[in-house]
Image (cartoon, helix red, strand yellow):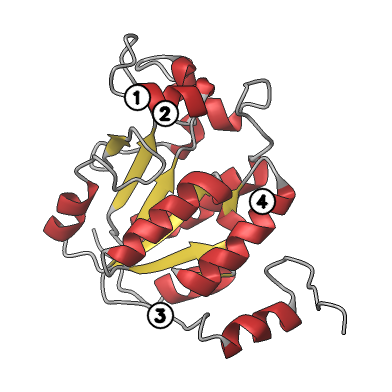
Amino acid sequence: MPEQTFAHSHSNPALREQYARAGFGGRVGWGERPAVLVIDMAGAWTHTDEQLGSDLSSVLENIKTLLAVARRKGLPIYFTTMAYDPALREAGEVALRKLPHLAKMIRGSERVRLEPSLERRENEPLIEKPRASAFRSTNLLSELISERVDTTIIVGCSTSGCIRATAESAFDLNFHAIVPAEAVGDRSPSAHAGSLFDIDMRVADVMPLAEVLEHLETLPDRA
């Protein structure tokens, strides 16, 4: 009998059923105190003329829709970027060999600045992370603990890299991890689809943005 193969996409019912039979794809659900993690929506990723860049305009608009609700509900919001001093000691030799684009991520440059239309507020920390995960070698975990957060809503880019790594870290640290499908993006459509599937099966709940917004609207408004 020929080996059975499946198209690798988040919406493939046969592939989802195969993983479900193997014990994957349970639901983490919502906790009581969500926070929003906006991953790497800075010039290096969002400007199409940049080495890392791709068209994330729809993702950006969906993130802004989410942020409007999150701010009205008084949820903790954190932004990340990747930035290093010009000497690049923080990046490390191995990472620079594998990811030569890191050499361009210089602290204070336009590449590492957030998209202005996100309108980051003073009480919304900007975390500079040296690796893909927002938790790796940063103070994000301690800040989430201080805010009594138990649920992370992860948006931004790239789905196959920093979104996936951050979702895995959140899962490993016993946070509920929620990924709104329309609020994450990747320069590769196939990597985006495959990563969304794996994230949903292994570490987080991938949900339509509309369902995420519907849940947040059940929370009380806060000053």
Q: Residue at x 23, y 47 (%)?
A: 140
x%, y% of residue 201? 54, 73
The amino acid sitting under disc 1 is: Ala
The answer to whether residue 13 is left or right of residue 195 is: right
Q: Secondary structure at mark 4?
A: helix
Mark 3 or 1: the one toward you: 1
Which mark is drawn over residue 21?
A: none
**Earlier sequence position, callout 3 versus callout 4:** 3
Q: Position of residue 152 (x, y in %)?
A: 35, 62
Image: 130 above or below 31 = above
Q: Are marks 2 and 1 in contact (CB under 8 Å)?
A: yes
The reply to whether residue 74 is visible in this rendering is yes
Locate residue 47 relative to residue 219 in the image: left or right. right
Instruction: Find the residue positioned furthest to the left.
Output: 146
What secondary structure is marked by label 3? loop
Q: CA distance from mark 2 to mark 1?
A: 6 Å
Indicate the secondary structure of the residue bearing disc 2: helix
Q: Residue furthest right?
A: 1
The residue at which mark 4 appears reads as: 191
Question: Which three-letter amino acid code belongs to the residue tagged 3?
Answer: Gly
Circle 3 packing at 10 Å, graded few (<14), some (14-19), many (20+), is few
Asked if residue 151 is positioned above or below residue 111 in the image, the reply reads below
Q: Label 1 neighbourhood size at 10 Å, few (<14), some (14-19), many (20+)?
A: many
Work out how far the residue at label 4 is from the one at label 1, CA to CA, in angstroms: 24 Å
Relative side of 114 to 197, left or right: left
